[in-house]
Image: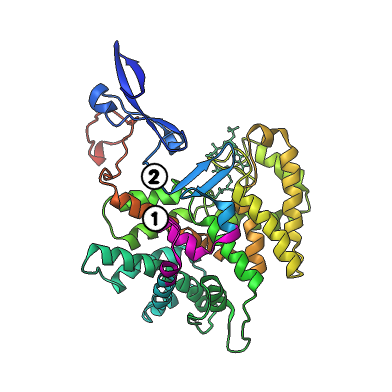
Amino acid sequence: MSETAKLTYAGQTYELPIIEGSEGERAVDISRLRADTGLITLDIGYGNTGSCTSTITFMNGEEGILRYRGIPVEQLAEHSSFVETAYLLIHGELPNQKELNRFSILLNDASLVHEDLKIFYSNFPRLSHPMGILSSMVNALRSFYPELQTLEEEIDMTVTRLLSKVRTMAAMSYKMSRGHTVVYPRPDLSYCANFLNMMFDSPVRPYEVDDVLAEALNIFWILHADHEQNCSTSAVRMVGSGRVNLYAAISAGIAALWGPLHGGANQSVVEMLQDIDASGRGFQHYVDRAKDRNDPFRLMGFGHRVYKAYDPRAKIIKAMCDRVLAKLKISDPLLDLAKELEAVALKDAYFIDHNLYPNVDFYSGIILRAMGIPTNMFTVMFAIGRLPGWIAQWKESMDDPNWRLCRPRQIYTGPRETNYVPIEERP
Ligand code: CMC
């Protein structure tokens, strides 16, 4: 018999199967616990709960490891393209040249968006956050692109459309928010160069895509492509488990990513650094506030639920900041501020004891600023990068014969049964 864990409760001993992953991670399978014992497990924030088995991404937070389909993210950042990495995540293996060409052609073919979508954009209030707009627009895509005949065709086309159109829609929303003419995608440009061109080309100032920036964006998106069962990915899987269409599931993922504790942290980091700079109060003041339990302030871009070592993505982005700014001969005072703040925090006993290191969002804003991306679009940039991961995770759940409707339980702590009191009799 394979290994089991024993649980003794109410005088009885139950054997619970142990599940082992390919990297030696172990879990107690409690799927029969309630049926056998009447107990459920309680794990607020799911810090100890595996919601699925998955073959997509491996993370080891203690050692700072991140691999997509077994390949270290450092290798992908150095050698791969975002499109190739997306293929790897979604299809499970690296494409050969023919497969990659076909995938790129499909992405180009799907890159235009329905002209009627522009009307939606122009009706959002001027100060709407781009993440709210993106989430709504992705949900609206189902109405523009109804379900196809076969499930296979539906999945293939929807995946391609999402990967290609979301990028076009993000650039389009930026142009429209400024009241400028929309720039259409160009099939002769790479995925990343195409995005930069749609963002920054204009009839009065033609945009020359800088290879350094296109390469930086490529790496930025590869590093964001998947991160196993985080808040937004779990939202995609959970919403998808009700068998809603993929557009709606991705729209839920975008909404989840928006939060400042998750993908919204990249915007919050830059705002925090600007506040620190403007206040003139010095780093220690902010580090002290972050340590104070009675103060809600946290150092944004620091800490992670899984990483208890330096986030491997942050390491790459930090090095990339230096390289890109040097090549472009730009100096950004926020980069110096970020480095000084990091140095102060990493020497502080609280940060050392709590294993709080910079995460991916700490330095990513600096790169996005160098590209000219406005701060309120930073999280949209994260969302475009995370699309392949969300899609791969959704697809894996749909293909899993054991995948069920996600429906957690709870321990009710409210009032016991009590009678309705008519309003005139209430105190
Ligand atoms: N500044 C100060 N203290 C912190 C921070 C921080 N950034 N992060 C965690 N802590 C402390 C926290 O106060 C708590 O202390 P104690 O145990 O003494 O009460 C302890 O560390 C554990 O914190 P937690 O909130 O229970 O841990 P978590 O695993 O739920 O937190 C986190 C993960 C990302 C929400 C948190 O570290 C945080 O709020 N960081 C700032 C926001 C941020 O940068 N988010 C981006 C995450 S990376 C992008 C992504 O993948 O989504």
| Amino acid bearing label 1 | Ala
Tag 1 residue = 392
Q: Gap in Å between the C-alphas at discs 1 and 2?
A: 10 Å
CB at disc 2 and ligand 1 closer than 8 Å: no
Using the image as rendered, state which of residue 23 and residue 211 is in the foreground.
23
The prevailing secondary structure element of the residues shown in magenta is helix
**Residue 203 magenta-drawn?**
no
What residue appears at the point 53 percent right and 56 percent down from the top-left corner? 224
Q: Position of residue 371 (x, y in %)?
A: 64, 69
- What kind of element bears circle 1? helix
**Residue 96 magenta-drawn?**
yes
Q: Is residue 198 left or right of residue 279?
A: left
What residue appears at the point 32 percent right and 49 percent down from the top-left corner? 397
**Residue bounds of the magenta highlight:** 78-101
Q: Is residue 425 left or right of residue 58?
A: left
Where is the N terminus found, in terms of image quarters? top left
**Image quarter for residue 335?**
bottom right
What residue appears at the point 64 percent right and 54 percent down from the top-left corner? 316
Considering only vertical position in the picture, is 62 above or below 234?
Answer: above
